[in-house]
Every structure is written in C-alpha cells, then in structure tokens.
Image (cartoon, grey):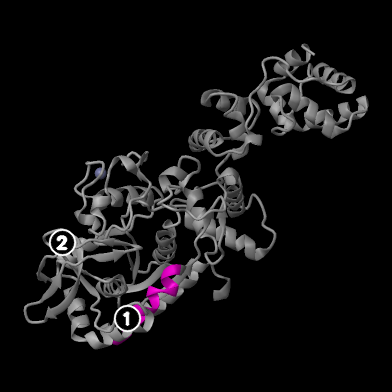
Amino acid sequence: MTIEHLHWADQLAERVIERSKEKIIPNIKCQQTPSGGKHIGNLNDVARAFFVYKSLIEQKQKCTFVHTSDDRDPMKEVPKRLMDLKGDWHDSGIFNFNKYMGMPYCRIPDPFKCCNSWSEHFTKVWMQGVNALGMNPELYSVDQLYKDGKFEPYILKIFKNIKKASGIVTKYQSTKKEDYIPFDAICPKCGRYANIDSFDLKKKTVHFVCSGKSIKEKIAEGCGFEGDAPLNEGKLQWRFEWPALMCIFNTTYEPMGKDHWEGSWKTAVDVMNVIFKKEPPIPFVYEFFLVDGKKMSASKGDVYTVQDMLKIIEPEILLFFYVKRPEKQRDLELSRIFQLVEEFDFAEKVYFDVERARTENREENYKRMYELCMHELPKKCPKRIDYKFLATLSQLFDKETIIKKLKDLGHLDDAEKSDIELLKKRIDAANYWINKYAPEEMKFSLQDSVRAKFDEKEVKALKLLAKKLEKKYNEAELSEEIYKIANDTGIAPKDFFKACYKLLINKERGPRLASFILTIGKNKVIKLVSQI
Ligand SMILES: [Zn+2]
Ligand SMILES: [Zn+2]
C-alpha cells in the first residue's frame, strides 16, 4: 500500500517517525481552554491528536501525548448553561459570574463549589468526556507551568528580541501598535490582566498600569493600580504562548481548527523560526462540524458534550465520527444518529469479513477506522442489534422484556455474555434517543382500542390477516404472506401497510411490519382486528 492510500492518522504517524530519527521522542499535543462552554466540536483537537498517537504506539514508537488546560486564559463570556460533575446542565444565570470577566480562569471560583477553581471544575468535566472515550492524554495546567517557571526562558527570549517580536505581531495583526509587548501582567489588586509598558531583563519583572482591557466587544475595567509583576504573574499573548508551549513539550505534531490555521498559526511559525529558532511541529487542520445544521454556540447554550452523546451512542461509535476524513465539513444530525450507528456496525462487520465494502480501498479504510476506534479488539464479530429496531422496541417494552422478545425471535442465537452487555447499553441509549431526539414520525404508541376508520377493502384484508396469523410464521414468511393478502383482496400493498399501521399505532407509517407484528405478538393484532 502506498502512503497516499493509508488512513490519514497513519500518514501523519509516518511523518512523525521521520522526524523522530533526530533522536527526539516525539510529542503530540492538543489543548483546551476550560471556559465551561467546550463541546464535541472542540473534541476534534483531542481526537485528531489521539489517532496519530495510537498509530505510533501500535508501531512501537516511543511518544508522548499531552493535553494542556489553558487555564490562564481570561474569561471572555459566561456560557448559557454549565455542566456539573455528574453531567447535568444548569442555567448559568443563577451564578452571576459576569464580575469575573477578564480574570484568568484558574483564579475564578468554581460555580458549583466542588473544586478549587472554575478551571479545575471545567477541566474535570472536559477530561471526564475525553477519558470516557479512552483517550487518556497526560494533562498539564498552563497556570502550573507558569508557576514552575517553564515559560520564563521563552518570555526572556521574546523580550530580548522585542523588535523582531513586534515586527511579527504587526505583520499579522493590523490592530496592534508597534510598541506592543505580547505579555500581560495579572494585577495583584483586582486580579485582571493589564497591558505592560516595559520590562526589566535584570530584575525579571514587568511594569504595568491596570487601565482596562478590551474583551471581545466589551471593556473589562481596570482598577488603576500601577506596579511591577514577576514573569510568572502574567501571561504571554496566545500567539506567543502557543509556540512557547510547543518548545516546552518539544511538540512534533499538533492538530488545529481552521480558525487557528488561518490566524495564529502563521504568527506561531514565525515566532518559532525567528525568535525560538526551533522547527515548528507538523500541523494538521480539521474542519468544524455542524449539529443539526447549526454551529454550536456556548453563549446561546446549544452545545453538546461527550457526556450528552454517550447517553445515545457507545463510546467507540462517537470516536468513529472523528476517525473519518477531517477536511470535509459535516453535519451531525441527532435525529438521524442511527445512521452513524449503522455505519459503525457495518465497519465492524467488514472488519470481521462478515460483510464486504464496495471497493478494496473502502474495505481497507473501514477496517482501519474500526481498529483505531476500538481500544480492545474483540476476538469475533460482536452481535449488535439494529439501533432503530431497539428504538422501536423500547417504546413497547421494558429492557428485560426486550431481551426476552429478541431471544424468542431468534435474534440472540449464539449471543455471548458480552453481546448481552452491549445490548443492554444500546437499549438504554436507543430509549433515551427516542424520547429526546427522535423525529415525530418514529414515535408511536401501541393502540389498546381501534381509533382509525377503515374502508371495505381494508377491513377485508385486515380480517384475512388476523385469520392467517393463527398459523406460525418467521419474519420472511410473514412478510411474504402480507403481500399475498394484499394481492388476494385486491388492495395495493402500500395501502394495506397503511391500514395495518393505522390499526396498530394509529399512524400511516411505522416500523418494519412483519418484524413488528411478531414482536408485539400476533394475539395483539387479532384482538384489534376483532374490534373493527
Ligand atoms: Zn467543581
Ligand atoms: Zn487592577
């Protein structure tokens, strides 16, 4: 197989290995600001790093996988909803946190009061999601790195080369003036960031007047305090902090969203080359995606977290969404989540040679994607029951009855204990999904008495169906019989189906009919027909 045919993660792993020949242990890095508004779109960063890391580990390549929590970033907005450590959402209006605007997240209290700070809380929420998917990167707090003096050599390098640094800033950011110094001090009086006007290389301090800073379109007021601060009581501007982090960790590969790629990455490359004199990491750009056709927005509150997603799909299936090609903007339709599940189930069957993909390339790709999403590869193809079918069943029966029904109908022949475990989880997921996200047309309730009206032909066909049901059928036989009844009574099959759904669920459409009748039990059908 040539390199272009490899999975994207394996292609990148090849490039990382190429660089590691210089006797450095490669580092893969990703990051997140613990703003409280992070969602499955932001998970791209971790996932695009993780798959390359996994490919390297499989090839026995030594490698580190690091996730920084950018907890010195200033608060720029309060998300509309906030998640507690149990994964439940709360309206942020009750907390009144606007007064902390412009302060570093690591110095803002935890709204839920269960952790030491805002950042500690939301880093925990975030990492719960990341690790629930089995990605487990090494976590570093940027605040701690400043406290430990890890940034100091890079801050000094920037100060010593301040002309070059301002040259880089003004080249890419037209709003910045030539005397701009890319470092802010934390004001000891009000705790907000203040622009600095000078630095002292000998004393290793910066001088500032706390005169307010603009945050997005707003201004965070300053308190007027004037003084000096040490280098670890401040923060490099993001465009300089990012390359400094790349140096601290010796980063070889780093994924980034399109916004960084088009913005701060260019600055970061110049800073690496001109000031730090280090080779920038291999970059990798991913596209953002939409959920139900919309961009997720923390300020509007319409975001989804890993915790939300794991209520409706298995972790390996959520990972499967991210293992696909990253360049295309995609839409995750929650009302059609079963399509992603079906594709994963298909990939699994392809992996175990139970199904074939259309072309050899697709076959290889499905197999590799499956492998990358599975932390432990099963020895044989697991038996997974169709998600949509379970969503149907969960509207009729409780979990134990569903399992019993599936056994009776032969769906669980040769099922292992592990398959039953998978099934139990999928029943819960499908049940949650049907209640929260499923489209109206998929929801129904089985009728106790007949509410619909039928014409003469329909009555004739339904009565014949009830009569025929006295015999024993499997799904295929019953399906054939339904068509035969339609034919024998002179009704179009689609009208007969409609009549059956009207009778059973008082709707014109419904789940696959033969399988549905066998699941609810033919006596139920016979009883309803007797009422018309
Ligand atoms: Zn907490
Ligand atoms: Zn101040």
What amino acid is labelled 1 in the image?
Val
Residue labelled with disc 1: 169
Residue in view at x 21 percent, y 56 percent: 106
Residue 395, horizontal then vertical, whole percent = 59, 27
Which sits earlier in the primary sequence, circle 1 or circle 2? 1
Residue labelled with disc 2: 223
Place residue 397 in its image quadrant.
top right
1 vs 2, front mark: 2
Q: Are marks 1 and 2 in contact (CB under 8 Å)?
A: no
Q: Is ligand 2 within 8 Å of the beta carbon of the residue shown at mark 2?
A: yes
Residue 233, horizontal then vertical, whole percent = 14, 66
- In the depicted view, which residue is nearer to us: 180 or 8? 180
Q: Residues within 10 Å of mark 2 (few under 14, many from 20)?
A: some
Q: Which residues are magenta?
A: 259-274
Residue in view at x 26 percent, y 48 percent: 97
* 413 with respect to 43 (left or right): right
Residue 134, horizontal then vertical, whole percent = 39, 51
Above or below — where is 519 with respect to 149? above
Q: What distance separates the C-alpha of mark 1 from that of mark 2?
A: 27 Å
Give the SS element for disc 1: helix
From this viewpoint, is residue 262 visible? yes
* Count of picture labels: 2
